[in-house]
Amino acid sequence: MEYLVSVIIPNYNGGKTIGNCIEAAFSSRYPMFEVVVVDDCSTDDSVDVIKRFPCKLICLDRHAGTSKARNTGVSHSAGQILFFTDADCVLGEDTLSEAVTSLSELKTTVVGGTYTTIPVDDGFFSTFQSVFVNYSETKRREPDYIATHAMVISRELLVRSGGFPEDFLPILEDVELSHRLRRSGCRLIMNPAITVRHIFNFTLMKSLGNGFRKSLFWTKYSLGNRDILADSGTASKELKLNVILYPTEAVAIIFFLISGKGYFLLLTVCLFILNLLSSRRLIMAFYRAKGFFFALEAALYYTMIYPLAVGSGAIIGAFSHMFSRRK
């Protein structure tokens, strides 16, 4: 049986990427779909770009956030199956077909996809992020959450759940929805064959800024949800260990420089090796994506620079959570 699929895309100032996103969606081989784009009161040329395509465009009259845009898209769509993606994601020709095939039980199942390992822009920092997300999201068939860069869910199930939370953090609304759906008895299924190519355009500072921002809000949400130690997608146990070992290694090096004691240097080396061993599957994913030298560079960045941004975000997120509880 073929279902009508509504591809729902929230957009806010995505003029540089939304055209590629919509064009790819209309290149789908799946025969029955519509594209619904909700512009969240953009201030760039997004609306002009969107109007070039035969999609359904809804313009919000004020900037209200991604959750509001997605919920609005649902209310203006007609499909029995909803496929959520982002304005900087590019669907493959078979993405929708794979999505419909995977959603075998409409009333109790949510299916997710992930990024391709090689993004649209294949510079170092963009590829690092794409491989990192792909690896983290596909480790388990039944993951902790389904991300909205490739989420497949029936209209009936989403409406029954209450939709995306509109009074929430600026990000992680898909994590909150996933956890709420799972508590109600739904299954979350990951299908690595459902992929979208992301447009990152990451530089060093954008990569670190992304890690900082996500860590800040993830820590704040996880402390409130009491699952700070959970192995949850990109907030994986490997990453958390990586962040914890980073200052420990730094302290050991400082003690070595101050005291000259060789065992502090040995401790630093042992901790670094432990970190590499715990992250070995991610490092192998880097290797499979672009070979030895990329994997080496990515491993060094992941263990020696990236934890600084993630750890800083976690500290500020923890303080923010603590102060918000006192109010």
Image (cartoon, rainbow, N blue to C red):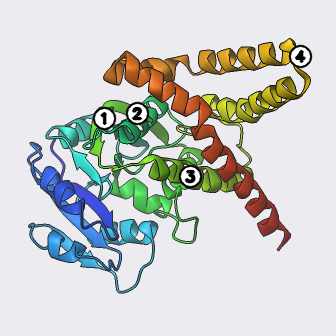
Camera-near label (1 vs 4) is 4
First-in-chain label (3 vs 1): 1
The residue positioned farthest toward the right in the image shown: 259
Query: Which element is circle 4 on?
Result: loop
Q: Position of residue 304 (x, y in %)?
A: 61, 32
Q: Residues within 10 Å of mark 2 (few under 14, many from 20)?
A: many
Please state which of residues 112 and 124 is positioned toward the viewer in this rendering.
Answer: 124
Can you identify the residue that label 1 sits on? 116
Of the numbered discs 2 and 3, the one sitting upstream in the chain is 2
Residue that carries the numbered disc 2 in the rendered image: 134
The part of the image, by quadrant, that contains residue 14 is bottom left
Give the Cα distance between marks 3 and 1.
20 Å
Q: Do the residues labelled 1 and 4 touch (CB within 8 Å)?
A: no
What kind of residue is marked 4?
Lys
Q: Which amino acid does label 1 sit on?
A: Thr
Image spot of residue 213 (x, y percent): 57, 56
- Quarter occupied by the C terminus: bottom right
What secondary structure is marked by label 3?
helix
Q: Distance between the residues labelled 1 and 4?
A: 46 Å
Give the residue type at disc 2.
Asn
Q: Mark 4 or mark 2: which comes first in sequence?
A: 2
Tag 3 or tag 4, which sits nearer the N-term?
Answer: 3
Label 1: state its secondary structure.
Answer: loop
Identify the residue at image location x=69%, y=30%.
Answer: 241
Q: For residue 158, which quarter of the picture?
A: bottom left
Q: Which of 215 and 161 is in front in this view?
A: 215
CA gap, disc 2 and disc 3: 16 Å
Mark 3, other Cα within 10 Å: few <14 / some 14–19 / many ≥20: many
Q: Name the residue under label 4.
A: 261
Q: Mark 3 points at which residue?
A: 214
- Residue 21 horizontal side relative to residue 207, left or right: left
